[in-house]
Every structure is written in C-alpha cells, then in structure tokens.
Image (cartoon, rainbow, N blue to C red):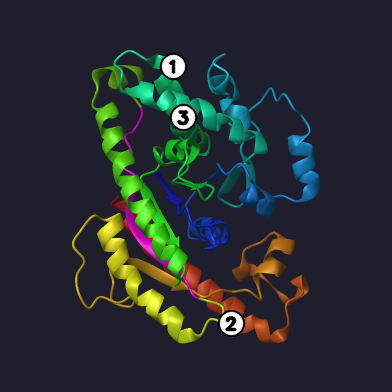
C-alpha cells in the first residue's frame, strides 16, 4: 500500500477538487483506493456525500463506532483508550471514504502538546497520539485491501497536518501561477524538511520500534507539483501569469527539494512538474451538484453541448495525470 497527500498551506489551488477527481481516476484505473478526510472543514466529504447523508452521519454527538476520522481517534484524543476501527463507505467501485467531521479540529491541541514529548525515550502516550492517523490509515487500507490511500488536509502548517503527513509516502504540491503560490512553496518546503528531520530522530529510537514495530516508516517525500492553469481576468493579464509560472520550477527545486536550481528549466521541461490541469470552472459546479467526477458529466447532469469536449479533455488530463502519479508513487 502507498499513501499520498496533496498539500499546500496556500488555499484556493484546487486541492480538494484535484483529490476527489484523482481518487476516482485511480480507482477507474484498477487500484483499490481509500480516501481519508483529515480536513476539519470536511470539504471533500461534502463532495462525496449529500446533505441527508451528512446529517445522518453527524447526528450522533458521541459516536460509538468509527464512522468518521474524528470518531476513530476520539478515545486516543481524550487519553481514554485506543483507536476505533474505521467504518468505510464504498462510494464507487474500488473507492472507499472515511468521512471527516468538524470535531477533528479538537485533535489539534493534543497533537501539538504531545509533539515535543515524542523525542523522549519513554513517552508512550505521545507516540500513540502522534501516530494515531498513521495507524488508522493502515487499518483502513487493510480492511479493503487498498493499494492507495489518499488524504485530504486543510491549508495549514499545524499539528494536525503534520500528523497526517507522517502517514504519507508521498506529497504532491498543487500550485497556481501567482505570487501567493510561490510564497507558499517558500513556507511548505522548509517545513516539510524540518518535520522529516524531526521524525527521523523519533523513528530511529529503540522505544519507537518497540512500540510500533509493525508500523511502516513514511518519508512523505515531495514527488512533484501540479499547476492549475489560471482563469483569465481583465485585471490580471495572461503575461503576468506566465511570469509567475516561469518561476515555479526554480522555487520548487530551491525551497521544496533543497537543491540548487538548474537554469533554463520551464514547467514544460521540468521533471518535477507532474502536469498542468486546466481550470475547468464551467464543469465544477455541475460535478459538485451531481457528486461525480468532472470527467463523468453528461448532458443529463445539465452541461451543454459545447461542454462535452471539455469533459473529454478533462478525462484525458486526469487519466494521464493519475498514471504519472502512480508511477512516481510506486517508487516513493
């Protein structure tokens, strides 16, 4: 099993939409996929499930079963027990969801409080809290024999996202061709490097291996970035977007990979660029309403005849992208 996350502390780069569509395409390509929503805002869960399903899912304030991520970690969060086994929802052939819940945000504080203690040699509570999401993902994958686990996270560099990344083999960074995404790379890269160095110290301790001998060690290595193409706006000319896009390869190599950037590399020639995805703004609202991938939309879902070509283009883009990611993920 391999695990990955699309991660950027800059919001508005299409992370949740990309995650939803890629998960479906992985499953469509023959993989068994589990999606785990670790974003307390639950945007991905709201794309998969309608309001009636969400109401039924969230009506129990004190869940007794692992129907959401928050319910699974609740006892660990409170220091009163172990993880609840996850109850996965099959949302499509070969695709399962462990939904999110707003109360997962309460896990942030225990994660932050226990993190400094994981460096001690005898703090089992700190290790249990910090590795809870990692253990949970392995339980979920084992339940359905998953090949790929995909996490969704919010746009932050907080303790909850750090704990989620500790469960990931690979990190993909979605970016947009603008100043804010470039600044995001400057924040994300050094943070990932520091988290990885810290976690290497922890996992090298004998106490960690005694406590979690069966737990795989994940490197959460960046395997590339995705560029979502811009939407044309009168006040932001195309030339400006091209200028920002030209800087992405250099900034990614310098701040995320911690390497000296090569000169003359463009998005088109950069091996770190997994692909560019068109901003399918005309399709997204229909896909959200239909709760299906954009590349599965039909005229019965409300799209016009002129959008059929956009759907076909979307399908081809995501098929190519999913295959490229799967190849990188296999070697992560």
Judging depth in this view, the residue of 283 and 243 nearest the camera is 243
Rendered view: 295 above or below 209: below
Marks 1 and 3, how far apart in space? 13 Å
Q: Is residue 229 visible?
A: yes
Q: Which residue is mark 2?
A: 233
The magenta-colored residue range is 215-229
Mark 2 → mark 3, Cα distance in angstroms: 41 Å
Residue hosting label 3: 112
Of residue 141 and residue 265, the one placed in the foreground of this image is 265
| Spot occupied by residue 257 in the image (x, y as percentages of width and height) | 26, 56
The first of marks 2 and 3 along the sequence is 3
Mark 3 secondary-structure assignment: helix
The circle on residue 125 is: 1
Would you place residue 211 above or below residue 201 in this image?
above
Q: Secondary structure at mark 1?
A: helix
Q: Is residue 291 magenta?
A: no
């Amino acid at each position: 099993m391999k695990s990955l996350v699309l991660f950027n502390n800059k919001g508005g780069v299409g992370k949740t939409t990309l995650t939803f569509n890629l998960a479906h395409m992985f499953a469509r390509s023959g993989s068994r996929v589990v999606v785990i929503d670790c974003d307390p805002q639950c945007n991905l869960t709201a794309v998969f499930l309608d309001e009636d399903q969400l109401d039924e899912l969230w009506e129990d304030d004190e869940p007794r079963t692992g129907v959401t991520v928050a319910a699974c970690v609740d006892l660990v969060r409170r220091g009163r027990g172990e993880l609840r086994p996850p109850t996965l929802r099959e949302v499509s052939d070969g695709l399962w969801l462990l939904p999110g819940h707003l109360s997962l945000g309460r896990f942030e504080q225990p994660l932050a409080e226990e993190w400094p203690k994981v460096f001690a040699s005898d703090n089992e509570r700190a290790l249990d809290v910090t590795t809870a999401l990692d253990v949970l993902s392995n339980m979920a994958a084992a339940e359905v024999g998953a090949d790929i686990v995909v996490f969704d996270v919010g746009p932050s560099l907080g303790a909850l996202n750090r704990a989620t990344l500790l469960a990931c083999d690979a990190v993909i960074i979605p970016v947009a061709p603008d100043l804010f995404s470039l600044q995001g790379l400057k924040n994300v890269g050094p943070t990932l490097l520091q988290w990885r160095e810290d976690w290497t110290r922890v996992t090298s301790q004998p106490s960690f291996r005694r406590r979690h001998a069966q737990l795989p060690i994940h490197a959460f290595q960046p395997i590339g970035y995705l560029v979502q193409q811009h939407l044309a706006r009168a006040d932001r000319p195309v030339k400006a977007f091209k200028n920002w896009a030209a800087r992405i390869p250099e900034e990614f190599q310098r701040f995320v990979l911690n390497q000296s950037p090569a000169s003359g590399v463009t998005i088109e020639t950069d091996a770190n660029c997994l692909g560019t995805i068109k901003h399918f703004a005309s399709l997204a609202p229909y896909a959200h309403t239909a709760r299906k991938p954009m590349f599965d939309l039909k005229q019965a879902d409300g799209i016009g005849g002129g959008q059929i070509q956009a759907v076909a283009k979307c399908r081809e883009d995501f098929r190519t992208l999913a295959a490229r990611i799967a190849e990188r993920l296999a070697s992560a």
